Amino acid sequence: MAYSVLTENMCGIVAYTGNKPASPILIDGLRVLEYRGYDSAGIYVPGSGCYKAVGSVQDLVKALPGMLPGHAGIGHTRWATHGQPSTVNAHPHHDRAKAVWLVHNGIIENYTELRERLAREGHTFVSDTDTEVLAHLVGDAYERIHDLPAAVVEALALVDGTYGIAVMAEDMPDTIVTARFGSPIAIGIKEGEYIIASDAAPIVRHTRDVLYLKDGEYAVLSPEGYGVFSFKHEVLNRAPETVSYNIEDVQKGGHPHFMLKEILEIPTVLENTARGRIVMREGNAKLGGLTDAADILRETKCMIIVGCGSAYYAGMVGKLLIEDLTGIPVQVEVGSEFRNRPIVTKEGTTLVAVSQSGETADTLGSVREAKRRGIPTIGIVNVVGSTIARETDVGIYNHAGPEIGVASTKAFLSQLEVLALFALYLGRLRGLTQARGAEFAMEILRLPEKARTILSRREKIRRLAGEYLGYDDFLYIGRGYNLPTAYEGALKLKEVSYVHAEGYGAGEMKHGPIAMIDEVFPTVAIMPSDSTYAKMRSNVEEIRARNGPVIAVATEGNTAIQDLVDDVIYIPDTKECLTPILANIPLQLFAYYTGIMRGLNVDRPRNLAKSVTVE
């Protein structure tokens, strides 16, 4: 479905009520959430007013008169897919009496009809957003029944779409109502204090006790306590979870950018992703989240892997891994295409959804369509408590820790490793020998140290990025397991340096792309010493014959390649099916250094958000 409204995409919500001044806590939370949205920001504190600014959270700080009186408030940092950022479009939004204020992440699909109806009833609007309509609906109900939770539920019953919201009333200055449907809401719980946010990152410096709202639930919070309810106003008794990371995990740790910090965390992430999941004596992977689906997976006849962006490229590698180790035919689909066309499946199909955030709208839509058709679903996600994690039948967590940089680095590599473990697990269910499984598992365990070797050479990659800084076009080529690496490498360069780059199958060069090659169009060739090496070398020779500069990503010990290409980045030897995990690391570094040398904010590339939670 296409939307004509000004949609709110991957925005950040924070709210607080307790015994401390609210505005510093709100600002601090918005800074942590700024990776979710950064075209405008705003806060509302009852009795002190609402303040908004176009730009970053720092621009909002400059607009404030100082610390605002008040011990409760709501805040928002916005990223919109349509319309110009402006103070009137920034959140929080209010009803016509300025009695009710709210912040919202999601989209109101029937925004146009509701706005037209309210306009006929005498409402006027100051913004172009769908969110303002929701504020008016809550305000109207609150004016009639003067019960804020009931007014919120009544208003939400009128809307179609997705939302995570936090709502306050001017005459109830310590109370916050929050609700969710399709957009995440986490509540940090502490004695006499509560902090609400779009994810746990702003919460963990205050408390590790976090309660995640489920779809169709709302919570009422004040310093006196909190309650969680269904939209039918049923009391829900659910204990909070203890999150396993702290605020240091979401700070830069002395590095200039989150992107570099997260690339340097890759060896640890690879260790964490595999920790406790390999049973060497059995040559198997132990994936507890799949225990209940073992019988289904043993009989599965085909698989569909669904993802968006980097997760889609991870799925392409996963397809080859699963087919190689199990013989199960696998198709890989882009979520936005899969969910919006007739699904042709056969009996025995299983769907695997890959998403770092666990909130990607098109991937989630694909899961829901599969479930509607009775297809078993598996989630591979990084965020505990996310919607895809809850809605899939079974799943596997990445254990990559929070990833703040918009361009996925460590989480993408953890997805590749999870898919390798998944393929091993499936293979052992379906006849893969213990010896072959143990050999494969041992090589997975060696990956962290090999990743450290690559990272120890990052200074060379930095120099290489400087040497190629003047080029405006790049071609990335690969074959087999490293065709997805070519796609992902080109994507990273585009994302963080705004340099035009294309990923292409090396075998397709003579079918058109080679026409573009000349002395100012460099090629990055991913060509480890594997079954595709001879053909890759032939492709590179064709490029060199046309004066195209070539950077090769090659296996250590291959000195012959130096006579063919202009520059070489070496990676340690590993099994062919695991080379994408190592080959992507230098490509991430190359993109990172290119971006910072161009003076760009690599953590928050223009026009992008960390995950796309609406269409």
Image (cartoon, rainbow, N blue to C red):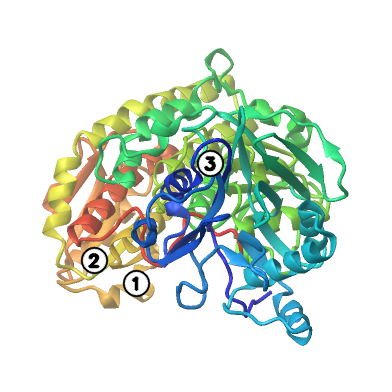
Front one among 355 and 483: 355
Q: Which mark is residue 542?
A: 2
Q: Are marks 1 and 3 in contact (CB under 8 Å)?
A: no
Secondary element type, mark 1: helix
Work out how far the residue at label 1 is from the one at label 3, CA to CA, in angstroms: 28 Å
Residue 328 can be seen, yes or no:
no
Left or right placement of residue 377 versus residue 558 in this view:
right
Counting residues from the N terminus, which is met first, the one under dot 2 or under dot 1? 1
| Residue drawn at the location 78% of the way across and 82% of the way down | 117
| Residue drawn at the location 59% of the way across and 16% of the way down | 282
Secondary element type, mark 3: helix
Q: Which mark is residue 293?
A: none
Graded by Cα atoms within 10 Å as few (under 14), some (14 to 19) or many (20 or more), the crowding at tag 2 reads some
According to the picture, the residue beneath numbered tag 3 turns out to be: 321
Question: Residue 29: x percent and y percent?
Answer: 47, 45
Counting residues from the N terminus, which is met first, the one under dot 1 or under dot 3? 3
Q: Nearer the viewer, mark 3 or mark 2?
A: 3
> Above or below — where is 77 with respect to 207?
below
